C-alpha cells in the first residue's frame, strides 16, 4: 500500500520547496543536491525491496509496486518542482518518472539480490533524470549545453546525490515499513 | 489481482501522458490559470519555509558576535553596491546631460521610475534555469516583462510570470536571457547573454571598438524592453580574433545574482517588446 496522499502530497511539496529555498544554500563547487530525485529514488527502491522481502518476488505486482509507487511520487514531486521553476510544466515530472521507472526495474531486478548494488542506481538515475530533462528543454527550443551539463552539473551531482541517498533511504525506511504493515493488515 | 498490474501500467501511462500534455499546453500558454492557482496555494508555504530556512541558516551561522559582524558586513556591502551603482549611474547621467546640453541644447528630464520592493523567497530548483521567485505578484501590480533591479540601478532581470502573490523573475544570467547593452565609455553596443554557469558575456561588439578591462556595461534601451542606463556589470575579459566579425567580452555582474535577497520591480516602465508581454 502506498502512503496516504495526505502525507505524500505535503511531504513532496515540502521537498520541492526545500529544493528551491535550502538547496541553493548548499551549493558545493557550483552544484546543489537533487533533493527530489534522491527522495523519489530512495522511495522507489524501498518499495521494491519491501515487496521482495514479503516474498512477492515472482509476482508481477512486485515489479509494479516498486515502479508504481516511485513513478507516482516522481510525477507529483516533478509537478511541484516545475511550478517553482522557469521550466515548462511537466519537464521535471517526465524526467523524474523515467528515472524512477529505471530505479524500480533495477531495484527489483538486480539490486534486490544484493542491496549494496542499489548505490549504482544513483549515478544511473541522475544521468537519466538530467539527460531527459535537458532533452525536453532542448525540444522546447531552449539552448542546451550538453558537454557543460555533463561535466559541470551531472557528474558533480552524482557525488552529491550519492552522499544524500543513504540519508533519504534511512529517513523513509520507517514509512515504508509502516505502509507495508498496513497492507498486510488489510 | 490479475488485472492489477495492467491497471497499474495504465496508471503509469496516464501519468506520463499527463506530463507530456502539460508540457505541450504550457508551451501553448493554456496552463497559466492552473499554474497561477497552484502558485497561489504554494506561495504562502514557500514564504514560511524560506523564512524558516533563513532563520536556521542564521542559527547555524555561529556566535552572536559573528552574526552581528556578518550582518554589518552585509549591510556595508549592500551600501557599497548601492553607492557604486549610483555612482556609475550618476556618471552616465552626467555624460548624457553634457551631451544633450552641448549638442541638442535642451534639458531632458531624468527618468524616474516607480518601484515595488520584493523579497526573494525561492530560486529555480533546476540548475539549468536562472529564475527567482519573489513575494510580489499581481497584488502589487506586477506584469510580465517588467524590469527588476537592485541596489539603486543594477539590473537583475525581468519578470517572467506573475501569480496572484508571487512572481518568477528571469535573471540576466539565464541562458535564454538577452539584453541590449552598451559600454559606458566607448558607447559600443552589443548583446549581453547568460551562460550555462550563470555568468554573462557581451557579444556582437564591433571589431573596431576598443574594449578595456573594467569598462562598465549598461543597458542601451534598444528594443524598448528595458530602460536605458541600468548597470549590468564590468568587463573582465575581452575575446578578439581577426577572423571573427565581432569581439566579445566576459562580464562580472554588478551584483552577485546568487546572493540576492531583496529586489525592486520597476512598475511604470512601458515595455515595448511584444515578446516579453506574452
Image (cartoon, grey):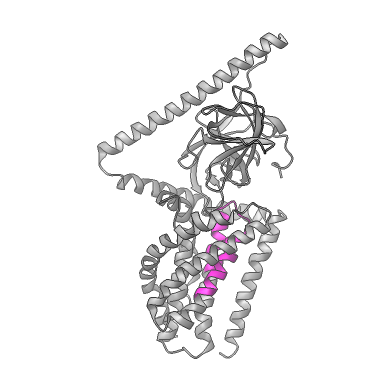
Question: Dividing the image into 4 quarters, which one contains the N terminus of chain B?
Answer: bottom right
* Residue plotted at (42% across, 82% down): A112
Q: Tell me if residue A77 comes above or below residue A51 in the rendering.
A: above
* Residue plotted at (58% across, 57% down): A146
Question: Dividing the image into 4 quarters, which one contains the C terminus of chain B?
Answer: top right
Quarter of the rendering containing residue B35: bottom right
- The mark tally for this picture is 0
Q: Is residue A72 magenta?
A: no
Task: Report whether residue B50 is seen.
Answer: yes
Quarter of the rendering containing residue B113: top right
Horizontal relation, residue B171 to residue B26: left or right: left
Secondary structure, magenta segment, majority class: helix
Depth check, front residue: B35 or B155: B155
* Residue plotted at (47% across, 42% down): B258
Q: Position of residue B193 (x, y in %)?
A: 61, 40
Quarter of the rendering containing residue A122: bottom left
Q: Position of residue B96 (x, y in %)?
A: 63, 17
Q: Position of residue A140 (x, y in %)?
A: 68, 56
Q: Is residue A85 magenta?
A: yes
Task: Report whether residue A3 is seen.
Answer: no
Depth check, front residue: B51 or B104: B104
Depth check, front residue: B175 or B143: B175
Extent of the magenta region: A74-103
Amino acid at each position: 500500500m502506498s502512503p496516504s496522499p495526505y502525507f505524500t502530497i505535503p511531504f513532496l511539496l515540502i521537498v520541492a520547496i526545500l529544493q528551491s529555498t535550502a538547496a541553493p544554500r548548499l551549493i558545493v563547487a557550483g552544484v546543489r543536491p537533487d533533493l527530489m530525485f534522491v527522495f523519489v529514488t530512495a522511495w522507489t527502491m524501498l518499495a521494491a525491496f519491501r515487496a521482495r522481502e514479503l516474498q512477492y518476488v515472482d509476482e508481477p505486482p512486485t515489479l509494479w509496486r516498486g515502479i508504481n509507487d516511485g513513478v507516482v511520487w516522481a510525477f507529483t514531486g516533478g509537478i511541484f518542482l516545475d511550478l517553482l521553476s522557469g521550466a515548462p510544466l511537466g519537464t521535471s515530472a517526465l524526467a523524474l518518472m523515467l528515472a524512477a521507472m529505471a530505479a524500480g526495474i533495477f531495484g527489483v531486478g538486480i539490486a534486490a539480490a544484493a542491496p549494496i548494488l542499489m548505490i549504482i542506481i544513483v549515478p544511473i538515475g541522475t544521468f537519466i533524470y538530467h539527460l531527459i530533462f535537458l532533452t525536453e528543454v532542448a525540444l522546447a527550443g531552449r539552448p542546451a549545453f550538453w558537454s557543460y551539463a555533463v561535466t559541470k552539473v551531472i557528474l558533480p551531482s552524482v557525488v552529491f546525490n550519492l552522499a544524500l541517498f543513504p540519508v533519504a533511504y534511512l529517513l523513509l525506511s520507517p514509512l515504508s515499513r509502516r505502509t507495508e504493515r498496513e497492507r498486510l493488515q488489510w | 489481482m490479475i488485472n492489477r498490474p495492467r491497471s497499474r501500467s495504465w496508471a503509469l501511462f496516464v501519468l506520463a501522458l499527463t506530463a507530456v500534455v502539460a508540457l505541450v499546453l504550457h508551451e501553448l500558454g493554456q496552463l497559466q490559470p492552473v499554474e497561477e492557482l497552484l502558485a497561489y496555494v504554494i506561495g504562502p508555504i514557500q514564504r514560511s519555509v524560506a523564512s524558516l530556512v533563513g532563520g536556521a541558516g542564521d542559527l547555524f551561522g555561529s556566535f552572536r558576535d559573528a552574526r552581528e559582524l556578518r550582518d554589518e558586513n552585509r549591510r556595508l556591502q549592500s551600501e557599497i553596491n548601492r553607492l557604486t551603482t549610483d555612482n556609475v549611474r550618476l556618471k552616465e547621467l552626467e555624460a548624457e546631460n553634457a551631451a544633450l546640453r552641448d549638442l541638442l541644447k535642451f534639458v531632458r528630464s531624468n527618468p524616474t521610475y516607480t518601484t515595488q520592493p520584493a523579497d526573494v523567497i525561492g530560486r529555480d530548483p533546476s540548475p539549468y534555469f536562472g529564475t527567482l521567485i519573489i513575494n510580489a505578484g499581481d497584488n502589487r501590480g506586477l506584469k510580465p516583462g517588467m524590469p527588476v533591479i537592485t541596489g539603486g540601478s543594477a539590473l537583475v532581470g525581468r519578470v517572467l510570470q506573475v501569480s496572484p502573490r508571487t512572481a518568477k523573475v528571469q535573471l540576466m544570467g539565464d541562458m535564454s536571457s538577452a539584453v541590449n547593452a552598451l559600454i559606458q565609455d566607448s558607447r559600443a553596443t552589443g548583446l549581453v547573454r547568460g551562460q550555462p554557469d550563470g555568468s554573462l558575456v557581451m557579444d556582437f561588439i564591433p571589431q573596431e571598438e576598443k574594449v578595456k578591462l573594467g569598462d562598465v556595461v549598461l543597458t542601451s534601451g534598444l528594443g524598448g524592453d528595458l530602460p536605458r542606463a541600468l548597470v549590468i556589470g564590468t568587463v573582465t575579459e575581452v575575446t578578439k580574433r581577426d577572423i571573427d566579425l565581432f569581439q566579445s567580452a566576459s562580464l562580472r555582474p554588478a551584483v552577485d545574482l546568487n546572493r540576492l535577497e531583496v529586489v525592486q520591480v520597476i512598475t511604470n516602465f512601458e515595455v515595448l517588446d511584444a515578446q516579453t508581454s506574452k
